[in-house]
Image (cartoon, grey):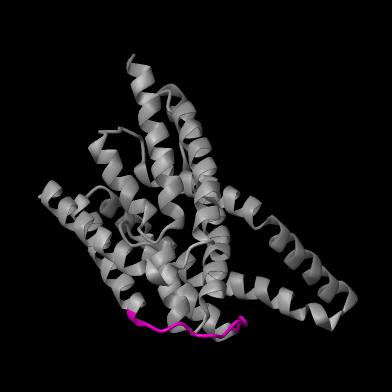
Amino acid sequence: MQKILEILKYIIIGFIQGITEILPISSSGHLALTFDLLNIQTINQLDLTIYLHLASSLALIIFFFKSLKQIIKNSFQFIFKKKIEFKKDFLTIIFLIIASIPAAIFGFIFKPIIEIFFDNGIYVALGFLITSLILFLSSKIKNNNQSNYSLKNTLITGFFQSFSIFPGISRSGTTLFGSKIAKLNEQKGKEFTFLLLLPISIGSAFLSIFENDFQKQFYENTIYLYIVAMIVAFIFTLISLKYFFKINLEKKYKYYSLYLFLLGLFSMIYYL
């Protein structure tokens, strides 16, 4: 019975990751809060969170598979066959790499601090409140019609993604806000936001794998729980993506902002 309850907890964790990774409400913050509410004991919350992000990234690869395949194929056509009409796709890959650099630097420098933040719920509550403010401000910024990626607008978007390394601060929320500041239109902002998740998430996961003590995880019998959570996260990320790209996000910002404000207050009271 105890093992079934433990599996159920990790199914919930995977579900929370899947539905919150895509919405601008901070999956890392929701995970940190859920760990505490369900009293989930794991070796390293940050590492499990990274693995769950990897599961979501795999769902993103499948969702964007046709687009990614086309971009990569056209990039090779530009590099090796000098077909100038495919230069735009090649530059998209370059822009994704460049835009990922700020978050990679932030993550490398501040990882010890981030781990402390994950262990202190007050920081998670503050993150929710900060994201609430970001979404409120996003609702006040008018949409732009710029549909082409450039070094400037992708670097600005990537810079804003850096702040989401802290729990409670939404990666998609801050990155979408950055894309608005950079004057990308909503559809392009959405697309770049989720393509931008791939390099940083996959890179973080591989670094975490090399740093992890898997022998200890096998000894404490937690590996299968991680796998269960990742499978559930993968499935619900795919479901969430289909919903997310059908909605008019502009009309939803205020509701997400209000939700996070209330959740931030609840979390603050819970952790005090």
Residue 71 image position (x, y, % from top left): 73, 67
Decide which of 224, 195 is in the foreground and name it: 195
Magenta span contains residue 141: yes
Q: Is residue 207 above or below residue 223?
A: below
Report the residue at 39% width, 70% height from top.
251
Q: Quadrant of residue 85?
A: bottom right
Report the residue at 27% width, 54% height from top.
117
- Is residue 54 in view? no
Magenta stretch: dominant secondary structure: loop
Q: Which residues are magenta?
A: 140-150
Magenta span contains residue 33: no
Q: Is residue 248 left or right of residue 198?
A: left
Q: Is residue 269 above or below residue 182?
A: above
Report the residue at 60% width, 70% height from top.
97
Residue 241 image position (x, y, % from top left): 53, 54
Report the residue at 36% width, 76% height from top.
138
